[in-house]
Amino acid sequence: MATPRKMPSRSELTGALKTAAVVGSVLLLINQYEAVMGQMEFNLTKAILSYCVPFSVYLYGRLSVASSG
């Protein structure tokens, strides 16, 4: 049984940041379209989650595959 790592590597963090930037921007436009166009108030919580979720999912996927193999 492999020992799970506690900290992601620099390349994994870089990949997670790049993924979060691209996917998070798309999610932000989907979830906050009216706010971006100035028709509604901007929701900071939704904006933060739009970037945190892809970042977390990317790292979870990379680290779970690395620890299982």
Image (cartoon, rainbow, N blue to C red):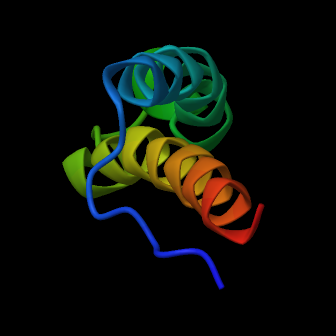
Screen quadrant of the C terminus: bottom right
Q: Nearer the viewer, residue 59 or 48?
A: 59
Q: Residue at x 35, y 43 (%)?
A: 8
Q: Residue at x 46, y 54 (%)?
A: 56
Could you say where residue 27 lies in the image, as x and y percent from the top left? 62, 35
Q: Is residue 66 above or below residue 68?
A: above
Could you say where residue 41 lies in the image, as x and y percent from the top left? 28, 41
Q: How many numbered markers are drawn?
A: 0
Q: Residue at x 47, y 29 (%)?
A: 12
Q: Is residue 59 above or below residue 11?
A: below
Q: Residue at x 60, y 45 (%)?
A: 58
Q: Nearer the viewer, residue 35 or 12?
A: 12
Could you say where residue 29 lies in the image, as x and y percent from the top left? 60, 25
* Residue 38 at least partly seen: no
Could you say where residue 57 lies in the image, as x and y percent from the top left? 59, 55
* Residue 27 at least partly seen: yes
Q: Is residue 24 left or right of residue 5?
A: right
Q: Nearer the viewer, residue 53 or 3?
A: 3
- Extreme bottom residue here? 1
